[in-house]
Image (cartoon, grey):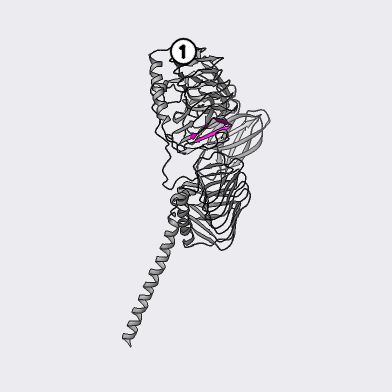
Amino acid sequence: MKKIIHNLSKITAKKVAIYIILVGALVNYSVIAFSQSPSLGTVADFVLFSSNGAVTNTGISQLTGNVGTNTGPISGFGNVNGVMQNIDGATAACAADLLTFYGQLNSAIPTLFPSELLGNGDTLVAGVYKIFSKATLNGNLYLDGKGNANAVFIFQIQGAFSTAALSKVKLINGTQACNVFWKVEGLVDMATKTYMRGTVVANNAAIVTNSLDTLEGRLVTTTGAITISGSMTYLPTGCNKPLLTGPIPPPLGATACFALFSSIGAVANTGITYIVGDVGTNVGLAIGFDSLIVKGKIHVKPDVSTATCAADLQTMYNYIYVLKPDVELLYPAQFGHNLVLTPHTYLLNAATAFTDTLYLNALGNTEGVFVIKVNGALTTSTFSKVILINGAQAKNVFWQIEGQVQIANNSVFQGTLICNNAAIGVSIGDSIIGRLLTTNGALSLESLMVTIPKNSCNSPLPINWTYFIGQAVEQSVCLKWSALNDFNNKFYIIERSGNGINFNKLTSIKADAMSTSPSEYSYTDTQPYSIGYYRISQIDNDGQQTFSKPIQVIANINKSIQVQSYIVANKISVKISGYPSRKGIIELYTIDGRIIKTKEVLLKNEGNTYLIEKPLYKGTYILSISGENKRLYTGKVVVL
């Protein structure tokens, strides 16, 4: 009998052990299923793709990534920051990889089973979520990575998926759009102004987006049409995706120091034009420039420097000419219109009309290089703008134009422009941050500003501070400063601090870029601290910022009022006297300037005592008393 019991206990122990192993294996498999992103293969390169179906756009949509279909037409698209692929080797490879990718999403073991109603302020953590029906996104849905940049979210929706207008997927605590996946067994329909994150895969169904939708991710379908309308869709970054660098920049040589140059042709100016950089021509004359407002050398006629520049310009042009483009922008007549480009070599294979705004997005890489090649003339609309974002720098932007260039009034143009065998014309109110160079052609200007990019040819600092002072005037503080070389300066920001560490903005003042002598400025702070610190931050036209040294100013605001403050139980007792009867305000601030208590009072000349609640936390606080829209007193209160 004992032997039988012993054998049974052994069998039971084995079963328990096996059970534990199986459970552990299932748990580990589940963890693996959502702790690693599935493999996209060549799907990763496409922002829109259908294995079998038309891909159609209406309106002006902004797309970054390839667009393609393996069976069906592509229509209605303007310029796309990617390659248009239609029934070719790339689409065949993508169709095969999409089936594999879909299979991985479909076979992931679900760990959570939410309601078909997603959003409404809910927060979800990493996992595989399965919904056994159609699903709807409404309001805000937060995906919380808990500080893990590799956290993966997979949504398996066994029916159609729709979004309400203004719904948003928000990523918090490290979550990345590249790790978010939506597998949908039906129609995907996004209402207007949806903000979607992640790669959306529709199986045997269509995908529809509406005006002002935004998606950081991809829209792909195994079989079905994709229709977008006036929306923005761009590939996600992160997940070990290589940082875009663009091509190796061309050698500048002696051209680095020139803001304006023609190898063969006159360089002529009319009106008041401000230049930072050299001006010259190697065949002809440079005329109409005022040496007082040109911060560089004017080579009125050819010399050794212009001969060197002409040779180096030809070398730079030859280098760019043979660069193979990564992306062809197929609609040169529609260039601009808020198009966003990333570090690449681009080709526009015809005369190009640049309208409205072009964004150059470096994706955080400050050394990302942009080369834009135009196989024809380039014209711009009035008020056209090249805007650099996410680390892009004018020194890394290059334009090769095979025809005449005409930049219309009040435009902002950035980068080094090389015109081949044609003239360049720039107009009243233009701002050029870069260079205008031509291998053979006249260069004409009228009342504008040209500044070579920073960090080239030892270009000057934005400004030279001549002085910055502050003094108490009655119960205010008057600040005065002066600066040289305001040509590339956009505006000043006045900042104030109560401790000399944490500064807050008071106001901004536009720089006097037209001044030929030292510019002088002033500002009056009508509500100063009793002991205040001030500094000025200066913003260049290209967005770079420098700071003045902070100064300390002791104000007169405590001389007409007597204040005593001390702690009583859970209150701060404030006794105020010596000021005519007026309505006043007592305020209590944290040391970094956040207001935490406010009390309206009646100030009396003979004095009165007021009680305000003591803060919950120990520390030093700032007590402020105001009356008649003036700050009368500022002092410290220590809570122990």
- State which quadrant residue 331 falls in: top right
The amino acid type of the residue labelled 1 equals Gly
- Magenta-highlighted stretch: main secondary structure? strand
Q: Secondary structure at mark 1?
A: loop
Location of residue 47 with respect to 432 vertically, above or below: below
The reply to whether the magenta stretch includes residue 360 is yes
Task: Decide which of 386, 637 is in the foreground and name it.
Answer: 386
The reply to whether the magenta stretch includes residue 308 is no
Query: Over which residues does the magenta segment extend?
Result: 347-363
Residue 469 shows in this picture:
no
Task: Decide which of 609, 480 is in the foreground and name it.
Answer: 480
Residue 59 shows in this picture:
yes
Residue 298, x across and y down, in percent: 45, 13
Location of residue 342 with respect to 434 vertically, above or below: below
Mark 1: few/some/many CA within 10 Å (<14, 14-19, 20+): some
Residue 179, x across and y down, in percent: 47, 51
Residue 27, x across and y down, in percent: 42, 64
Location of residue 384 with respect to 513 vertically, above or below: below
Task: Decide which of 590, 156 is in the foreground and name it.
Answer: 156
Residue 533, x across and y down, in percent: 50, 28
In the image, taking residue 33 as reference, residue 378 lies left or right, namely: right
Give the residue number, with chain letter if any, for mark 1. 284
- State which quadrant residue 427 falls in: top right
Count of numbered tags = 1
Q: Quadrant of the N terminus?
A: bottom left
Task: Determine the residue located farthest toward the bottom in the rendered image.
Answer: 1
